[in-house]
Amino acid sequence: MVESSSVLCCPECGSSSLYRDGLRCTLEGPVQRFLCRSCGYRFSERKTNNNCLTPSKGSQVCVILQEAKNLTSATETKTVAGEKKQISNNKILDFAWQMKKHGLAEGTIRNRIRALTTLVKKGADLINPDSVETVLATEKLNDGHKRELVRIYHSFAKAFKIEWIPIKVKYEPKQPFIPLETELDQLIAGCGKRTAMFLQVLKDTGARSGEATKLRWIDVNGQNRTISINNPEKSSRSRTVRVSDKTIAMINAMPKKYGEYIFNPNRQSLRESFWLSKRKLADTLQNPRLKQIHFHTFRHWKATMEYHKTKDILHVMNMLGHKSIQNTLIYTQLLNFEKEEYHSATAKTIEEAKQLIESGFEYVTDLEGVKLFRKRK
């Protein structure tokens, strides 16, 4: 824990309970990083004109190019004897800048730079395809990781016109983990207010976490109970999704802390807070399955449940924003409800039937002048 915690506070939640989280290399020299014990937010310190320490929230939005430079600087001395000179910092910075100019997402750029840095750390010379293939063949990498490294290096080779025929990697993707709804609800209830609201939005909309962090207050229609996803990721379509009264109520109860945005645009702070909360809750409830739940798990769960509810693959495709139905077909085979259990309800009037439908019940049949409804448990 930080000894001077009374001087330095978390810029996210104001807590003075901090951990030291290593040093961050900058042009001005190394800067101490901190991790908030209360909300999981990571930030750096900076010195003001009067030499006082203050938190720097710009560490998360600091240019990706600087991050690339930091990563490559750490690998410059880790070369294999006899190999050609490792690719310079400027070469990797040029690649990052090319991706930026082509409009790739910041997260994509970071992942690619880290993957290339991993290859360099393992002894690969990025301008020599044979060296890269040697690393891929000799290092202990699972098929999924190896396939991703091949894909990223292929994009690097194309950017600098390096002749390389990508090696083939046999990879069979695993089926995504689909939790129970009760487990998702336990996680939502066990997190802080804003993180819980974020998870509830993911559960109701099936949006990607990056799409949810870009939601603005004007995207929420409380009267119609809808949320518009106007900043889709991965070339998806924008869409409008109907949500529950609970979600709308949680959103309305939150202060407008981030200006026009509902959530902190820095997704990492939400991710760290969620990670700490789910680990603690999994230990408390003695349910290790909770540790397998990630932000994207909510999207898989929503799509799977929506398909089994409607049996309409086009509806699920539009809800997820997919442009290709091939990306949606996976949800037709994730779960097998052989022993389905339902709650049942009856309605004698139109008003009662309307309330049941709004509560998630679906109509089954008429019997003795009464309408029967059901909802999966």
Image: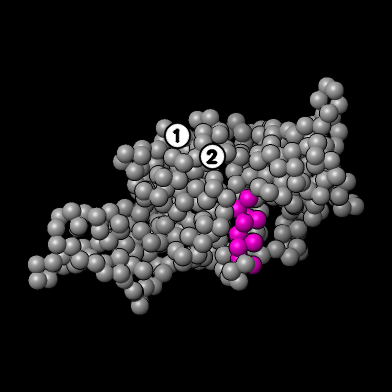
- The magenta segment is 273-283
Q: Is residue 282 magenta?
A: yes
Displayed quadrant of residue 334? bottom left
Q: Nearer the viewer, residue 241 or 186?
A: 186
User: Which residue in the structure is indicated by mark 1?
Assistant: 217
Q: Hey, what amino acid is under mark 2? A: Phe
Q: Hey, what amino acid is under mark 1? A: Trp
> In which quadrant of the rendered image does the C terminus lie?
bottom left
Q: Bin the neighbour count of mark 2 within 10 Å (Cα to Cα): few under 14, some 14-19, many 20 and up.
A: many
Q: Nearer the viewer, residue 357 or 309?
A: 357
In the visual, does 47 lie left or right of 184? right
Tell me the chief SS of the magenta region.
Answer: helix
User: Which residue in the structure is indicated by mark 2?
Assistant: 263
- Residue 72 x/y as whole percent: 79, 42
- Residue 309 x/y as whole percent: 32, 62
Displayed quadrant of residue 308? bottom left
